[in-house]
Image: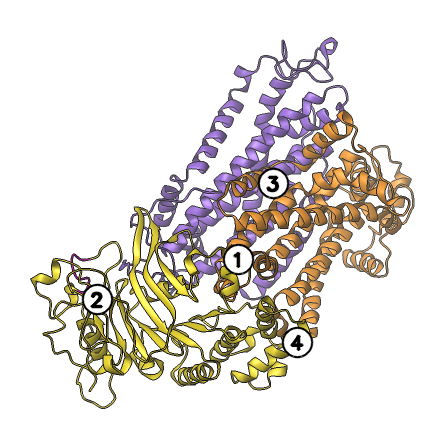
C-alpha cells in the first residue's frame, strides 16, 4: 500500500509542473507587451519600466520561469501589483471562505444525494425514482447562481428566513456561520447533489444485480442490512470518483456563487484581479486551485484502497 | 428398500403421488404442485411446473437436467429467491416443518434462510462480496441468526473455515475473497451455509464452475458435513457422474417438469424414460465401450414453444402418434418407488449403465 | 432517462432461466459511413431525445426570427417606464432602463445559442487532432499530451476561463475561445479513447498492410468511425458551454454589454433584484430548458451509441 501511495504521489508531479507552466504562461498570452497591459491605461513610462523590472521581463524566459517557480516552491507567490501585499497572504486570507463553502457543498451532496440515490435504486422505476430522476436532471441543468438568486429572493428577501449576504467566521459564531453558508452551499451544491444521487442510483442498481447480493439474501440477511452495508460499500467507488471530479467543478462554481452572496472568498479576489489585470494574484489563485484539485484526487485514490481491497496489492 | 409401496393410483385419473423414496424417514421438505411463472412481453408464462418433490430426512436428492430444464428455478423457489418481478409463484406449496414456506411473511422467511434451510450457488467467484473479508461475511451470517458477540462470532467463523478445509484459518479469515481460489471460495460459501447447522442444504451446481480434482474434494466435504450435521440435501446438477457420487435419490427434469424419479442406483441401471436413457448414453465412458459420443438431437424447447403432448417427443427415438395427444402424468414405473412420465415406459427396455 | 428501444425478438424471461435464443451475431462493421448512418437511425427512435431536439430547433427558429417576433427593439430605452412588472405593455416586465424584458430574451437567444458554438469549434480544433495523435501514435507523445490534458482538467473550467479572459481581454469571442481551450482536453480524452478502440480493428491493420500512410489512415479510416462518440461528447459540451457562458457573463467577463446574452440578462436581473425581481426568472428558465434538452439529446445519443457497441 505504501508503494501504491508513493507511485500515485510521483505521478502528480508532472501535473503540478505543467500546471505551474500554464499558470506562468498566462502572462505571455496577453497580446502585445505584457508590461504595458499590466500597467493599465494611464501608465507612465516609469511605471511600465518598474513593472518590467519587478516581473523580470527583461530576463530570458527560462530564467524567469525558474525564479518564479523556485519562489513558488519556497512559498513566495509574488506580490500583488496593486497593494504590494504578498499574494500568498491575500490568498490565504480568502481561502477559508471558499474552502468551507466547497466542503459544505460536498457534505450536503453526500448527505442528501447518497440516501436519495439509494432509495431510487432500491425502488427502481417507482414513482419516487422517476420524480428523483427528473429533479436530478433539473439540478444539473440549472445554473447555480440562478438557484442561489432564487433562494435569496424567496427565502431571504421575501420570507426573511435566512440571511442573504455576508460571512461570519466559524470561530466567531458557528451557528451564524452555518446560517450564512447554508444558502450558498445549497446553490453551489445543487448540481453535485444531483450528480451524486444519479451515480449512487446507477451504482445501487448494478450492485443489486450481483450474485453476492443473492447470497446475502439466501443466508437470511434482511434488505436494510444488505443495502446499508453491502450495497453502499460496493457502489461507493464510482460515487467517490464522481465526487472527486465534482470538486474541481465546485471550486469553479464557488467563484460565481460567492458573487451572488457577497462572500469574501477566492472568487471575489479573482474577479477583482481580473478587472485590475493583477496577474500575480491571478497566477496565485489558479495555481492554488490546481494544487487543491490534485490533492483531492490523491485523497480519492487513497479512499479506493479502503473501498476496494484488490487495489492494495497493485 | 422396497417396503414402502406407492399408493395405488388409477393411471387415468388424479395426480400422481410425489416420488416417495423408501427407507421410512419422514420427509423434511415437500414440494407440492409448484408452478413458477415469468413475465414476458406476452404476459406470464409458466416456466416450471407443476412439480412435486420430496426430500426425506438425512438423504440427498439430485435434481438433474440440461440447461433450460427448470432445475435451478425449482431450487431457488424453495427459499423464495426468485426475483418477483419478473417471476411469480401462482400455485404450489413448500412444506417444511408443517408450514407452507410460500405463505410465510417475508420476515419469517428470512429467519429460515441460512438458519434452517441454506443454499450454495454455482459461481464461487462472484457469490462472495469482494469488499468484505471472508471472516466478516461468515460472522455476519452467524450474528444474523444467533445472539452472540462479535468476537464469539469471529471465533466460530474461524472454526468453520478450519472445518471446511481452509489451512491457517485464523489468518485467512482476515483475507478478502479475491485472495482465494475458486475451490477455496466455494468452501467459504459452504462454511457460511452450514454456520447455523441448517436442516436442509440446497446446492445449485456448486461444482460446475470448478475443475475436476477440486470437484471431488468439494463433494467429499459436502458428504462429510452431511454426515456430521445430519443435513438433508437437494443437489442440482447436469452432471450424472456427480449424481452417482453423492445422491441417494434422483429426480430428472425436462422442460420444467419432473420426467423420472427414484433411487439413484436403480435409476441408473434401469431408466424408465427415454430422456434419462439419452442422458445416460451421453455420458463419456473411459472404458472404450462406445466408438462415438452420443448426444440427444435437438434442443430443450423454450417455455413459449412447448410441443403438443409429451414435451420430449420431438427428440425421442421411441415416440409414437399417441405421444402427441396429451401430456403424460407421472406413472409408477419399473418399481414401487419409481415414477416416469412416459406412456411407453412399461413396454420399452431402456438401456442403463450396466 | 431514456426510453427503451424496441427489439425484434421476443423478450425472454430474465435469469435464472436460460433459454436458447439461437441468434446469429451481426456481421462486423466496415470502414465506411455505415456505422454512422446506423447510429443516426437508432437515434431517431429515442422519443425523449427527439422531443428535446425539436425544442432546440424551434428555439433556433425563434432566435432567427427575433426581429419579427419581438414587440420592441431590445435596445430601446424608456426610462420613465423602468421596472414595470410583467403584464400589460411589457409581457415580461421592463428593466432598469425601461427596455422590454421579453424582446431582450428573444434576442438573447441568438447569442446564447451561437456563442457556445465558437467554444465548441475551438475545442474540436484542438481536441480532435491532438486526441487522434495521442491515441494513434502512442508512446511518449501520448504520455506528454495526456499529462498536459490532465493538467488542464485539474484546473476548474470557470477559473481557467476567467484567467484566460484576464490575459486576453474581456470580449465575447475571447471568453468563448477561453472556454474552447478549457474544454478541449475533455474532448481530447474521448477522441483518444475512441481511437484506441478503433486502432485495433482489422480494417486498420488491412489498410496498414496495403501501405497507406499514417495520416491517410487517420483521416480516411479512423475519423469516420470515431465520429459517434465525439458527437455525444459535443452535445454534452454544448450544454456545459451554455452554462459556462452564462456564468462568465454573469460575472461580467463573458459577453459584454450592449450585447445581451441570457447570462447578461441574469446579471442585470441580479443587480436590480430588489426593484425588479421578475427580471431574472425567464433567462434562468430558458437556460435550464436548453441545457436539459441538450442532456436528453446526449443521453439519447449515448444510448444509440451503446447499442451500436453492443451489436459489435
Whether A301 is among the magenta residues is: no
Query: Chain drawn orange, letter?
Result: A
Local crowd at mark 2 within 10 Å, few (<14), some, or many (≥20)? many
Residue under the point 88% across and 49% down: A79
Q: Which mark is residue B107?
A: 1
Q: CA distance from mark 1 to mark 3?
A: 40 Å
The mark closer to the camera, 3 or 4, is 4
Q: Secondary structure at mark 1?
A: helix
Position of residue A272 in the picture relative to residue C203 (left or right): right
Q: CA distance from mark 3 to mark 2?
A: 62 Å
Disc 3 and disc 4 on one polypeptide chain: no
C204 lies above or below B228: above
Q: Which residue is mark 2?
A: B330
The residue indicated by pointer 4 is: B152
Q: Which residues are magenta?
A: B307-312
10 Å neighbourhood of mark 4: few (<14), some, or many (≥20)? some
CA–CA distance between discs 3 and 4? 49 Å
Q: Main secondary structure of the magenta part?
A: loop
Badge 1: chain ID = B
Q: Residues within 10 Å of mark 3 (few under 14, many from 20)?
A: many
Q: Look at the picture and state if C96 lies above or below B252.
A: above
Marks 2 and 4, how far apart in space? 50 Å
- Say whether disc 4 or disc 1 marks the residue closer to the N-terminus: 1
Q: Is residue A126 placed above or below B66 in the rendered structure?
A: above
Measure the C-alpha gap from mark 1 to mark 2: 36 Å
Mark 3 and mark 2, same subunit? Answer: no
Q: Position of residue B194 (x, y in %)?
A: 51, 75
Amino acid at each position: 500500500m505504501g508503494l501504491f501511495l508513493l507511485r500515485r504521489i510521483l505521478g502528480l508531479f508532472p501535473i503540478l509542473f505543467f500546471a505551474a507552466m500554464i499558470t506562468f504562461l498566462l502572462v505571455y498570452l496577453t497580446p502585445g507587451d505584457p508590461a504595458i497591459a499590466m500597467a493599465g491605461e494611464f501608465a507612465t513610462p516609469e511605471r511600465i519600466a518598474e513593472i518590467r523590472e519587478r516581473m523580470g521581463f527583461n530576463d530570458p524566459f527560462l530564467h524567469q520561469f525558474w525564479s518564479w517557480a523556485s519562489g513558488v516552491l519556497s512559498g513566495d507567490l509574488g506580490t500583488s501589483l496593486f497593494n504590494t501585499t504578498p499574494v500568498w497572504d491575500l490568498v490565504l486570507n480568502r481561502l477559508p471562505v471558499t474552502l468551507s463553502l466547497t466542503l459544505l457543498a460536498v457534505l450536503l451532496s453526500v448527505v442528501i444525494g447518497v440516501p436519495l440515490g439509494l432509495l431510487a435504486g432500491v425502488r427502481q422505476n417507482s414513482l419516487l425514482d422517476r420524480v428523483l430522476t427528473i429533479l436530478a436532471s433539473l439540478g444539473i441543468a440549472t445554473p447555480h447562481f440562478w438557484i442561489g438568486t432564487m433562494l435569496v429572493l424567496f427565502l431571504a428577501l421575501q420570507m426573511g428566513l435566512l440571511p442573504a449576504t455576508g460571512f461570519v467566521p466559524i470561530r466567531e459564531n458557528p451557528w451564524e456561520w452555518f446560517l450564512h453558508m447554508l444558502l450558498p452551499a445549497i446553490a453551489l451544491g445543487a448540481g453535485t447533489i444531483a450528480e451524486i444521487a444519479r451515480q449512487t442510483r446507477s451504482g445501487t442498481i448494478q450492485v443489486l444485480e450481483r450474485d453476492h447480493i443473492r447470497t446475502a439474501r439466501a443466508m437470511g440477511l434482511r434488505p436494510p442490512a444488505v443495502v446499508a452495508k453491502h450495497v453502499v460499500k460496493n457502489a461507493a467507488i464510482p460515487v467517490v470518483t464522481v465526487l472527486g471530479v465534482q470538486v474541481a467543478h465546485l471550486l469553479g462554481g464557488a467563484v460565481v456563487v460567492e458573487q451572488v452572496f457577497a462572500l469574501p472568498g477566492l472568487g471575489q479576489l479573482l474577479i477583482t484581479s481580473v478587472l485590475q489585470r493583477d496577474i500575480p494574484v491571478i497566477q496565485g489563485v489558479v495555481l492554488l486551485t490546481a494544487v487543491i484539485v490534485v490533492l483531492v484526487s490523491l485523497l480519492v485514490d487513497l479512499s479506493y484502497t479502503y473501498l476496494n481491497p484488490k487495489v492494495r496489492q497493485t | 428398500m422396497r417396503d414402502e409401496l406407492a399408493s395405488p393410483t388409477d393411471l387415468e385419473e388424479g395426480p400422481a403421488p410425489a416420488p416417495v423414496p423408501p427407507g421410512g424417514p419422514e420427509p423434511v421438505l415437500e414440494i407440492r404442485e409448484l408452478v413458477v411463472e415469468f413475465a414476458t412481453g406476452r404476459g406470464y408464462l409458466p416456466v416450471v411446473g407443476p412439480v412435486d418433490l420430496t426430500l426425506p430426512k438425512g438423504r440427498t436428492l439430485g435434481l438433474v437436467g440440461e440447461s433450460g430444464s427448470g432445475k435451478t428455478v425449482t431450487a431457488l423457489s424453495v427459499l423464495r429467491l426468485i426475483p418477483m418481478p419478473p417471476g411469480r409463484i401462482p400455485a404450489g406449496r413448500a412444506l417444511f416443518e408443517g408450514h407452507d414456506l410460500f405463505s410465510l411473511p417475508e420476515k419469517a422467511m428470512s429467519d429460515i434462510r441460512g438458519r434452517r434451510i441454506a443454499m450454495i450457488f454455482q459461481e464461487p467467484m462472484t457469490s462472495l462480496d469482494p469488499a468484505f473479508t471472508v471472516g466478516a461475511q461468515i460472522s455476519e451470517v452467524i450474528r444474523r441468526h444467533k445472539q452472540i458477540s462479535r468476537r464469539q462470532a469471529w471465533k466460530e467463523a474461524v472454526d468453520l473455515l478450519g472445518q471446511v478445509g481452509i489451512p491457517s484459518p485464523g489468518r485467512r479469515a482476515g483475507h478478502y475473497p479475491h485472495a482465494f481460489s475458486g475451490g477455496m471460495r466455494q468452501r467459504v460459501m459452504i462454511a457460511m451455509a452450514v454456520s447455523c447447522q441448517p436442516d436442509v442444504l440446497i446446492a445449485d451446481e456448486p461444482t460446475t464452475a470448478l475443475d475436476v480434482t477440486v470437484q471431488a474434494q468439494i463433494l467429499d466435504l459436502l458428504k462429510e458435513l452431511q454426515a456430521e450435521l445430519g443435513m438433508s440435501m437437494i443437489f442440482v446438477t447436469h452432471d450424472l457422474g456427480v449424481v452417482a457420487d453423492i445422491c441417494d435419490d434422483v429426480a430428472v427434469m425436462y422442460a420444467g417438469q419432473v420426467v423420472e424419479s427414484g433411487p439413484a442406483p436403480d435409476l441408473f441401471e434401469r431408466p424408465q424414460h427415454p430422456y434419462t436413457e439419452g442422458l445416460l448414453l451421453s455420458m463419456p465412458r473411459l472404458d472404450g465401450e462406445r466408438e462415438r459420443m452420443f448426444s440427444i438431437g435437438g434442443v430443450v424447447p423454450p417455455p413459449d414453444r412447448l410441443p403438443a403432448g409429451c414435451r420430449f417427443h420431438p427428440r425421442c427415438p421411441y415416440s409414437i402418434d399417441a405421444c402427441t395427444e396429451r401430456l403424460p402424468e407421472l406413472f409408477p414405473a419399473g418399481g414401487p418407488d419409481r415414477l416416469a412420465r412416459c406412456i411407453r415406459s412399461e413396454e420399452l427396455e431402456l438401456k442403463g449403465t450396466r | 432517462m431514456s426510453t427503451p428501444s424496441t427489439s425484434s425478438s421476443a423478450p425472454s424471461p430474465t435469469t435464472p432461466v436460460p433459454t436458447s435464443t439461437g441468434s446469429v451475431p451481426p456481421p462486423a462493421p466496415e470502414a465506411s459511413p455505415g456505422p454512422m448512418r446506423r447510429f443516426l437511425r437508432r437515434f431517431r427512435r429515442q422519443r425523449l431525445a427527439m422531443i428535446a431536439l425539436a425544442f432546440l430547433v424551434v428555439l433556433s427558429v425563434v432566435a432567427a426570427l427575433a426581429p419579427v417576433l419581438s414587440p420592441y427593439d431590445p435596445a430601446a430605452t424608456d426610462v420613465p417606464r423602468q421596472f414595470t412588472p410583467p403584464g400589460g405593455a411589457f409581457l415580461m416586465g421592463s428593466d432598469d432602463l425601461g427596455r422590454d424584458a421579453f424582446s431582450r430574451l428573444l434576442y438573447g437567444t441568438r447569442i446564447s445559442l451561437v456563442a457556445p458554438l465558437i467554444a465548441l469549434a475551438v475545442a474540436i480544433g484542438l481536441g480532435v487532432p491532438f486526441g487522434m495523435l495521442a491515441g494513434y501514435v502512442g508512446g511518449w507523445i501520448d504520455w506528454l499530451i495526456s499529462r498536459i490534458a490532465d493538467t488542464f482538467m485539474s484546473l476548474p473550467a470557470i477559473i481557467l476561463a476567467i484567467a484566460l479572459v484576464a490575459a486576453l481581454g474581456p470580449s465575447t469571442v475571447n471568453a468563448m475561445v477561453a472556454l474552447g481551450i478549457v474544454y478541449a482536453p475533455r474532448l481530447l480524452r474521448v477522441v483518444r479513447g475512441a481511437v484506441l478502440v478503433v486502432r485495433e480493428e482489422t480494417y486498420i491493420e488491412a489498410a496498414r498492410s496495403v501501405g497507406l500512410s499514417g495520416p491517410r489512415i487517420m483521416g480516411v479510416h479512423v475519423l469516420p468511425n470515431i465520429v459517434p462518440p465525439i458527437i455525444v461528447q459535443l452535445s454534452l459540451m454544448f450544454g456545459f458551454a451554455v452554462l459556462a457562458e452564462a456564468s462568465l457573463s454573469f460575472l461580467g467577463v463573458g459577453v459584454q454589454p450592449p450585447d445581451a446574452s441570457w447570462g447578461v440578462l441574469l446579471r442585470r436581473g441580479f443587480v436590480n433584484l430588489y426593484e425588479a425581481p421578475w427580471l431574472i426568472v425567464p433567462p434562468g428558465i430558458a437556460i435550464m430548458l436548453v441545457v436539459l434538452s441538450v442532456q436528453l439529446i446526449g443521453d439519447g445519443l449515448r444510448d444509440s451509441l451503446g447499442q451500436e457497441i453492443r451489436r459489435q
